[in-house]
Image: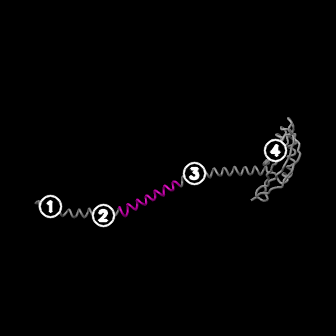
Amino acid sequence: MNAHQTDQGSLRKQPKSWVLTVLISGTALAYAVFVFMPTQKSIAGLRTELASQRKDVLELGALESEIVNLERKISAVRSTIDSWREHSPTPQQTATFIGVVSQLAQQAGAKVERITPQGVVKMSTLRQHPSDVTIEGDFVQISEFLRLLEERPETIWITRLNLSASGQAGANVRCELSFTVFADNPGDSD
């Protein structure tokens, strides 16, 4: 073969390889545009969704422990309410509570000067039974009376307390006290 024929043979092979290269490149470009890039976008979207769902799962874990804590608190509140209702005076007991106050004063060695019950205040779930009492005795007797009153199982709020002495050393102390006894209101509560 001569050199001229060899050049012509290689010229014929070049167009075929060039066409083949263009076809392969076009196919690769079409694959990249129509398959690879949309798939990458889809994968990126799935990764974002997966990250969001992982975040949700972590938040649910935190919410679960918060729910458990809230359930414990609700249980403690219910227990407190049940205990309060157990010790809450009935309407008959609140009517005779003035007598209990008088007994507490006598037990402490103090003298009851005056007990004045006030009107009952009805609320949505409980009733308030306010009263005013004036007691006289020495400081130790008045302190003992207040301690005994405080130890009662009923819920009692002291709304006013006024102590006054006669002015002489070792003299009696006068205690003017306003208090409220709280009772359950079962007939009107929800």
Disc 1 versus disc 3: nearer the observer:
3
Identity of the residue furthest to the front in this view: 167
Q: Residue 7 — which label?
A: 1
The image quarter in which residue 14 lies? bottom left
* Magenta residues (range): 32-55
Q: Which of marks 2 and 4 is nearer the N terminus?
A: 2
Disc 4 versus disc 1: nearer the observer:
4
On the image, numbered disc 3 is attached to which residue? 62
Name the secondary structure under disc 3: helix
Name the secondary structure under disc 4: strand
On the image, numbered disc 2 is attached to which residue? 26
Q: Is residue 22 left or right of residue 137?
A: left
What amino acid is labelled 2 in the image? Gly
How packed mark 3 is, by other alpha carbons closer than 10 Å (few <14, some 14-19, many 20 or more), is few
Q: Residue 162 — which label?
A: 4
Q: Earlier in the sequence, mark 2 or mark 3?
A: 2
Say whether residue 129 is magenta. Answer: no
Q: How far apart are marks 1 and 2 (CA)?
A: 29 Å
